[in-house]
Image (cartoon, rainbow, N blue to C red):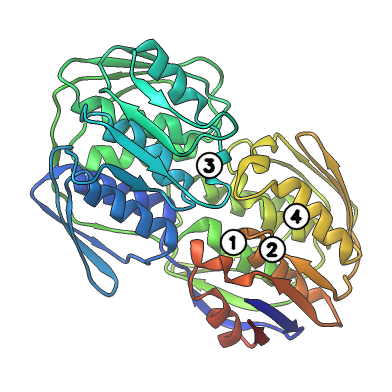
């Protein structure tokens, strides 16, 4: 599906979708817990559906209701020999070590770019623990494993995806003996690890965190049922807050100002751009105004990259994006693709190995651009239309289903004018 946007001012209130990061973590914890848990404020994006199906495949019983789940947890077992992670990196990387608590054979499959997203941290563990595995020469999926995870000392780099760390933090408490997880380089994305530790604590799991360099994990632990409500997603709020900076009048509702979410960093990043940010008890918004170029470090919050690239492209002066190498291994290479698409629109962006240099321009021109089948690129480009006079066409715009299925409906409710084409 392609969308053609006629530039209009956006105005109104938005209840931001529930945090995808927290949704994955709560569903997994509840699915491993003794007893029944209710997970409220759930949105059934493609990624969350992938995790639900993965948990069913290892024994959890899950009832889906309109906006909540009832989950009866189970010990890890094989209810299916194949798990389809679809395009969800979180599902794949969180669930691999959890599924390996059970020693029976298993095959992982996925779609889109997921088969090419790295799994080397786990493959090194498989080799050390003599867990048999098979994969294609030029990809990571399909991945077949035969063997079970054993307790011991695990070493993981801290400058790669924290999803590997989260997967092990979920799995290791279920093993019979104690384990230690050592982070061998400075940890990036600490906020995501904090989310994991907070959820694990709520579900009864004890882990000793030694300054994010070492985690001591007692074995033979039990997850306990817990009712949990998912809070609003700061990575999704970024698109609407950037829209405010570009002239919209959008108020974001139901956000937790004390959130552990790493992407809460959007609030600090907007201040770096000298955005006029406002936070009340029940809403967050920015007043329209001229923003200035900024230097932004993405080591802790790579998912904010596409939205902030649009803001930088339309801010006065020069912006520098640093420590952004992980933007290259998402649904697409987000550094290359955002530079390519915004330059088509008249932007002035330069691609660097681990970031970008961006010289702001006052406005952009309409054109046909590609989403690169990446939900965050599609949503970011939609907000760029606020600074255009001509129409903007975004190809393959259905990719928003991955995280925000009703994004285009919300865009129209705020006053956006969209023509849909199959």
Q: Earlier in the sequence, mark 2 or mark 3?
A: 3
Q: Nearer the viewer, mark 3 or mark 1?
A: 3
Report crowding for label 2: few under 14, some 14 to 19, many 20 or more residues within 10 A (C-alpha): many
Q: Nearer the viewer, mark 2 or mark 4?
A: 2
x, y percent for residue 122: 43, 25
- For the residues labelled 2 and 4, the Cα–Cα distance comes to 14 Å
In the displayed structure, 72 sits above or below 346; it is above
Query: Are discs 2 and 1 less than 8 Å apart at CB?
Result: yes
Q: Which residue is mark 3?
A: 115
Mark 4 residue element: helix
- For the residues labelled 2 and 3, the Cα–Cα distance comes to 19 Å
Q: Which residue is mark 1?
A: 375
Q: Which residue is mark 4?
A: 309
Q: Looking at the image, which residue is at 45% across and 39% down?
A: 142
x, y percent for residue 176: 15, 19
x, y percent for residue 353: 79, 34
Report crowding for label 1: few under 14, some 14 to 19, many 20 or more residues within 10 A (C-alpha): many
Q: Nearer the viewer, mark 3 or mark 4?
A: 3
Q: Earlier in the sequence, mark 3 or mark 1?
A: 3
Q: Earlier in the sequence, mark 3 or mark 4?
A: 3
- For the residues labelled 2 and 1, the Cα–Cα distance comes to 7 Å
Q: Which residue is mark 2?
A: 371
Q: Looking at the image, which residue is at 64% across and 38% down?
A: 326
x, y percent for residue 81: 26, 42
Report crowding for label 3: few under 14, some 14 to 19, many 20 or more residues within 10 A (C-alpha): many
């Amino acid at each position: 599906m392609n969308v053609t946007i006629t530039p209009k001012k956006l105005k109104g209130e938005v209840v931001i979708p529930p945090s995808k990061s927290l949704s994955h973590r709560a569903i997994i914890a509840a699915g491993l817990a003794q007893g029944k848990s209710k997970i409220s404020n759930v949105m059934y994006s493609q990624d969350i559906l992938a995790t639900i199906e993965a948990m069913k495949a290892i024994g959890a019983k899950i009832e889906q209701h309109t906006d909540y789940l009832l989950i009866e947890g189970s010990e890890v077992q094989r209810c299916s020999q194949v798990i389809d992670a679809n395009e969800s990196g979180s599902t794949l990387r969180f669930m691999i070590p959890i599924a390996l608590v059970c020693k029976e054979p298993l095959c992982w499959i996925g779609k889109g770019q997921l088969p090419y997203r790295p799994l080397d941290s786990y493959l090194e563990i498989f080799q050390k623990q003599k867990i048999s595995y098979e994969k294609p020469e030029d990809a990571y999926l399909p991945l077949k494993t035969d063997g079970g995870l054993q307790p011991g000392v695990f070493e993981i780099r801290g400058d790669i995806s924290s999803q590997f760390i989260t997967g092990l933090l979920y799995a290791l408490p279920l093993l019979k003996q104690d384990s230690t997880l050592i982070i061998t380089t400075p940890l990036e994305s600490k906020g995501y690890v904090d989310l994991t530790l907070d959820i694990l604590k709520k579900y009864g799991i004890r882990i000793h965190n030694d300054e994010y360099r070492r985690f001591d994990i007692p074995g033979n632990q039990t997850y306990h049922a817990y009712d949990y409500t998912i809070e609003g997603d700061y990575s999704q709020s970024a698109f609407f807050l950037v829209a405010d900076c570009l002239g919209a009048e959008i108020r974001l509702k139901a956000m937790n100002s004390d959130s552990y979410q790493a992407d809460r960093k959007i609030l600090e990043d907007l201040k770096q751009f000298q955005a006029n940010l406002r936070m009340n008890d029940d809403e967050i918004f920015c007043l329209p105004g001229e923003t200035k170029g900024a230097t932004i470090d993405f080591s802790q919050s790579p998912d904010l990259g596409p939205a902030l690239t649009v803001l930088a492209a339309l801010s006065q002066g020069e912006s520098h994006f640093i420590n952004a190498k992980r933007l290259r291994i998402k649904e697409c290479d987000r550094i290359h693709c955002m530079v390519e698409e915004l330059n088509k629109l008249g932007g002035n962006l330069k691609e660097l190995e681990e970031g970008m240099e961006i010289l702001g321009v006052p406005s952009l021109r309409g054109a046909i651009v590609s989403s690169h089948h990446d939900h965050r690129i599609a949503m970011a480009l939609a907000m760029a239309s606020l600074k255009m006079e001509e129409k903007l066409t975004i190809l393959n715009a259905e990719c928003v289903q991955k995280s925000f299925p009703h994004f285009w409906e919300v865009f129209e409710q705020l006053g956006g004018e969209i023509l849909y084409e199959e």
